[in-house]
Image (cartoon, rainbow, N blue to C red):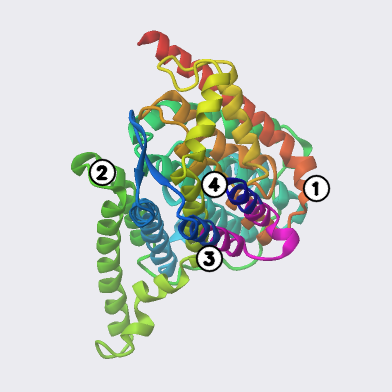
Amino acid sequence: METVLIVIFILGYLGIAMEHTFKIDKLIPALGMMAILWAIIAVNHMQVYEILPGVGKEAHHVEGVLLHHLGKTAEILFFLMGAMTIVEIVDYFDGFSTIKSFIKTKSKSKLLWLFTTLAFVLSAIIDNLTATIVLITILQKIIKDKEVRLWFAGLIVIAANAGGAWSPIGDVTTTMLWIANKVSAASLIEHVLIPSILCYAVPVVIASRMAIFKGKVEEDTTEEEESSSKYSSVMFYLGLGAIMFVPIFKTITHLPPYVGMMLSLAIVAAIAEFLSNREFSMGGATAGEGSHNHSPVHKSLSKIEMPSILFFLGILMAVAALESLGMLFDFAGILEANVPNLGTEHHSTKISDLVVLLLGAGSAVIDNVPLVAASIGMFQIGMDEPAWHFIAYAAGTGGSILIIGSAAGVVAMGMEKIDFFWYLKKIGWLALIGFLAGSAGFIVIRDLILNAA
């Protein structure tokens, strides 16, 4: 029966990986796979376990294990929903127009550094997907040359994915590792920040010397667009500050991150409602009139990406089904038996690094969320072990090698109509060089820290 489960999981995985070929949203195979796996486990009364650190497999009833995994998954989902809503509230007030005020140059090479650096920093706070959407939207208003814009968009994807890798709130996979207590915010930044900088800076250094980035962009003769809200800057900085507050809240209270995110959402929403009602009243309407239609919170909640939330629910619970049967735990045992020093105190600098590098390369083809979810279920090693930091880096940045390898790449592909093979030929090799440069940087930093200890 376990073979049947593995076949179903592989078929579901293929459905997710080939969503563009089949032209179906990846949430469909994810949810279907999750439901079928758990149904087979329940109908056949298969023995399920909880994997306890330092203990191993401990048998439990299927409903208890299902509830346990649902609770862990819900922590991630509510965290993401809170972050998405805050970002949408900022967008409601046109807060991201504030970024355009930073752009003062017409030099293509300087613009490249400015956009990629903004992508790197913003993605660490508001996540790499949103940062990519915001910056490509601004890019479309500044650069009219389609070919030049495609190059900019490709390098923004690399920078956004690199920026998301070193922050516990910058990418879904790093958030998963953080919430699962595999990494702490401070240690993740310590180990992954410099490799992530290398991952985006090396490709930008190479690209900035290319002919495509020589000279200046054409002057835009259209009128400068004004922000639709006088509170745009206030809400922009408030939103960023509220999201950055979450790791601080967790450090102080030791509560799960979603609790801090809900507090941040409550504060941002309260201020947004106050400012919105104030603007609405000044417009001549009575208090309460059409409040739902003009509520930034209601509008923002209606715009969050529910397909992504449902996809995460499906894939995380599907991986949890295999984990509950002990299959991932057993597979990790096979790896530990064949890969020297995997999961030991002194992390292997050779073969186990190769395993993580392959995981990173795999994330360019297969979604990085299930890859990281599987690694969490497989490797029973301690919090802040170097392997977790390397997994965070590799899974976050490896997806840049192909345009379909990350959410940032997919959205850029849609916004700019980037051809898969154009990206592979023009940008893919730059992303690979950046990925390998950052990986080398990580290994050197890790070894220095281990030797110093």
> Which residue position holds label 3?
307
Q: Nearer the viewer, residue 432 or 144?
A: 432
> Which residue position holds label 2?
250
Q: Are marks 4 and 1 in contact (CB under 8 Å)?
A: no
Q: Residue at x 31, y 84 (%)?
A: 291
> Which residue position holds label 1?
421
Q: Earlier in the sequence, mark 3 or mark 2?
A: 2
**Mark 4: secondary structure:** helix
Check residue 111 for magenta coloring. Answer: no
Quarter occupied by residue 394:
top right
Q: CA distance from mark 3 to mark 1?
A: 27 Å
Q: CA distance from mark 3 to mark 2?
A: 28 Å
Using residue 252 as the reference point, say whether residue 45 is left or right of it. right
Residue mark closest to the camera, 3 vs 4: 4
Q: Earlier in the sequence, mark 3 or mark 1?
A: 3
The magenta region covers: 11-34
